[in-house]
Image (tube, grey):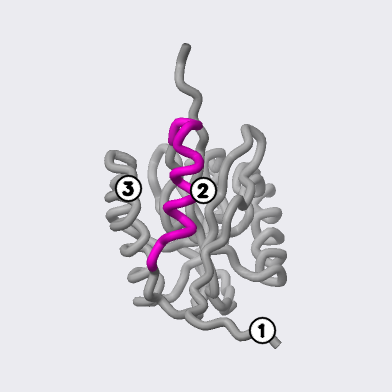
Amino acid sequence: MQNETNLYFIALIPQQKLLEEVIDIKRDMLRFNAEKALKVMPHITLKAPFQLEVREHIHLLSWFQNLFILNDPFYIQLKNFGCFPNPVSPVIYINPVLNTSVYALQKEIIRSFKNSFPGNVHKVDLNFKPHMTIAYRDLSPEMFDIAWEEYKSKKFEAIFQVESFYLLQHDRKKWNIIDIHSLATATKSN
């Protein structure tokens, strides 16, 4: 019998108002026959999707809950659009403004992940390029050229506070948040 696996990734997810704005932009990508990005909530990936055997699920949750992250909450500014003009599978995304806090957070997550789950760190994890995808996978190179011609000069600006990051798991239909790790160093409740 073959070992069953689960699919996961770790991401930043903006607050609801910005989520809705980005979903509207993803809906606009339907004009270019790109709908796959609509199946994933808007996010910035910190750890690319990875598979673990089902028996490792509890170990993953324990690792995630016990991560020692020194980052305080911070803000990410999103400004305009960017792309990865890959000739086979191009991507269009919302571009975050350079932010040392997000790089430090991602680096720490990957360092710890590499120690706990060796062999599950990908090249994309090591060459981190933060972005919020609005079209990918089913965006053909021809439609990419048309969409990018429009989006390369389109304006977009938003800012969101990063107070936590999320562990998501795929249930064979969609991605679901299964745990949240807070960056708050000291939370007071009234």
- Left or right side of 152 for 33: right
Q: Which residues are magenta?
A: 52-68
Relative height, residue 132 to residue 143 (above, below)? below
Front label number (1 vs 3): 1
The residue shown at (32%, 45%) is 122
Q: Where does label 3 land, which residue?
A: 116
Q: Amino acid at mark 2?
A: Phe
Q: Earlier in the sequence, mark 2 or mark 3?
A: 3
Q: Where does label 2 land, which residue?
A: 144
Q: Nearer the viewer, residue 46 or 2?
A: 2
Q: Earlier in the sequence, mark 2 or mark 1?
A: 2
Q: Amino acid at mark 3?
A: Ser
The residue shown at (69%, 56%) is 28
Relative height, residue 80 to residue 72 (above, below)? above
Distance between the Cα atoms at labels 2 and 3?
Answer: 38 Å
Front label number (2 vs 3): 3
Q: Evaluate whether residue 76 shows in this view.
A: yes
Quadrant for the C terminus, please. bottom right
Front label number (2 vs 1): 1
Label drawn at residue 189: 1
Label 1 Cα crowd, 10 Å radius (few <14 / some 14-19 / many 20+): few
Helix, strand or loop status at disc 3? helix
Q: Amino acid at mark 1?
A: Ser
Query: Residue 143's spot in the image, x, y percent?
Result: 55, 44
The residue shown at (50%, 80%) is 75
Which quadrant holds residue 66?
Answer: bottom left
Q: Evaluate whether residue 34 shows in this view.
A: no
Distance between the Cα atoms at labels 1 and 3?
Answer: 33 Å
Relative height, residue 88 to residue 44 (above, below)? above
